[in-house]
Image: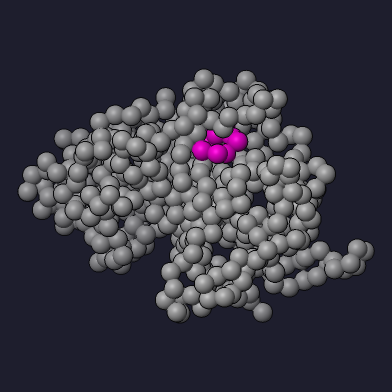
Amino acid sequence: MPYDINDTHDPKLESWVESANDPESDFPIQNLPFVYMASPDDMGSAEHLGLRIGDSILNLYELSHVVPILGKSARGEELFHLENGPSLLDGASSGLGQQIRKRLQELLGSSASDALRAQISEHLFPEDECFLEHIQPLDYTDFYASLHHATNVGSMFRPDNPLLPNYKHIPIGYHGRASSIVPSGTPVRRPVGQQAPAEEGGSPQFGPCKMLDFELEMGMIIGRGNELGEPISIADAEDHVFGMCIVNDWSARDLQKWEYQPLGPFLAKSFATSVSPYIVTMEALAPFRTPAFARAAGDPQPLPYLDSDYNRTSGGIDITCEVWLASEQMRSRDLAPVRLCKSSFKDLYWTLAQFVTHHTVNGCNLQPGDLLASGTISGATRDSRGSMLELTWDGDPWANPPVVVPGTQRTPIKLPTGEERKFLADGDEVIIKAYCEREGFRRIGFGECRGTIEAART
Ligand code: MN
């Protein structure tokens, strides 16, 4: 069953880690996201599981050797090593995660004894001194769940027929590439590839991508998998999700336009996908649940296998998502990044439970650690569009009456340096932020997902 709001969400809870009590922090004691990490004095790679609290990282693997984490007596250190990460992901969906969350709040809460604080402090490090890694998924699927995004993009390429007839019946997705998923901060090299011929009937062009883009997305990390041939029902779907992170599905639009028919995206997407390191658990997100997207009168209802009372009333999550940009020139002049857009995960046409259930309805097996991403999160207004493809486009199918223009009519975004962007330039840094706010609850956040564009290989 999905998580209820409980004592662990009490906004009055405070931590003895002072930075966690800053109301602006993404990481108060009500959040406690997991991360793969190595402590500063560790020579190895990020083999331990840690958690973020305020501006610090707590090494749970090291701590579990001196302080029991699973309960008063069970230590559980084996759970907090990379080799066994999947068992934590698995357990987290089955009540173990709740037990750990409660215990960690005791350890980090303001009523912890001085002796305990001293023991814990030895395994608590400033975030910027730790080596952080993302969870490396075995498999990655990207959905297309924003009706606004699908309609905007469809209007550019098929002005007469923007939304294909399947869209409101079936969560559309494509199978992404897990090997090129990279942690936040990894530079992204501009891809080279084929682009459509300049004239009809001519030869395709070949060279560096000229229409490089980001896609603002959120990802779901699978906790418990399913056996091949055993679908996951909508009632059980959320029990299989461990938590969420930020995703940037970098996209080469000119490569995509030439290659996408008839089998969907391929090299336009597989050169890199950036993910944020912190996994915010589904339990931490409980206060921010919303109804599923309100379908317009006349829209079809989901087929019964994709429908439930719970999904209708609470299938959405209000996660505010923002994209910021800093060009190389802006950074060299110490100018702050500018915000390009702001939208919310709750405005997606399909819910995360529907992703899981639809993905497995044919018997396909999900495995612990798999990544399911939402697709670009765009809203109805121009400043809530989650990609450059949409942000600089002059059409607006959501205006009354709709403004439908060919895909090439664009107004560039002006940067504070006077530079202009229709798509991303070399040296541009894209920063995605995500957070949840609700009256009566403590704000929690996902941190950031960053990536800077490097020039194409010549
Ligand atoms: Mn995408």
For image coordinates 49% across by 75% down, the residue present is 330
Q: Is residue 348 magenta?
A: yes
Residue in the image at 92% along x and 64% along y: 201
Location of residue 393 (image quadrant)? bottom right
Q: Quadrant of residue 418?
A: bottom right
Q: Nearer the viewer, residue 240 or 158?
A: 158
Residue at 63% x, 76% y: name it. 457
Is 371 magenta? The answer is no
User: Where, quadrant-wise, is the N terminus in this rendering?
Assistant: top left
- Residue 81: x %, y % from top left: 33, 49
Residue nearest the viewer, comparing 165 with 268: 165
Q: Is residue 109 left or right of residue 404?
A: left
Instruction: Determine the residue positioned at 35% across, 45% down.
Output: 444
Q: Looking at the rendering, in which quadrant would you find the C terminus?
A: bottom right
Tell me residue 342's x, y (percent).
51, 51
Q: Is residue 100 above or below residue 201?
A: above
Count of picture labels: 0
The percent coordinates of residue 225 (x first, y second) are 49, 35
Residue 147: x and y, percent? Answer: 65, 40
Q: Is residue 85 left or right of residue 176?
A: left
Q: Is residue 195 visible?
A: yes
Compared across the picture, whether 364 is left or right of 82 comes to right
- Above or below, comparing residue 236 to residue 400 in the picture: above
Nearest the eye: 311 or 78 = 311
Residue numbers of the magenta segment: 346-354
- Image position of 314 with respect to 421: above or below: above
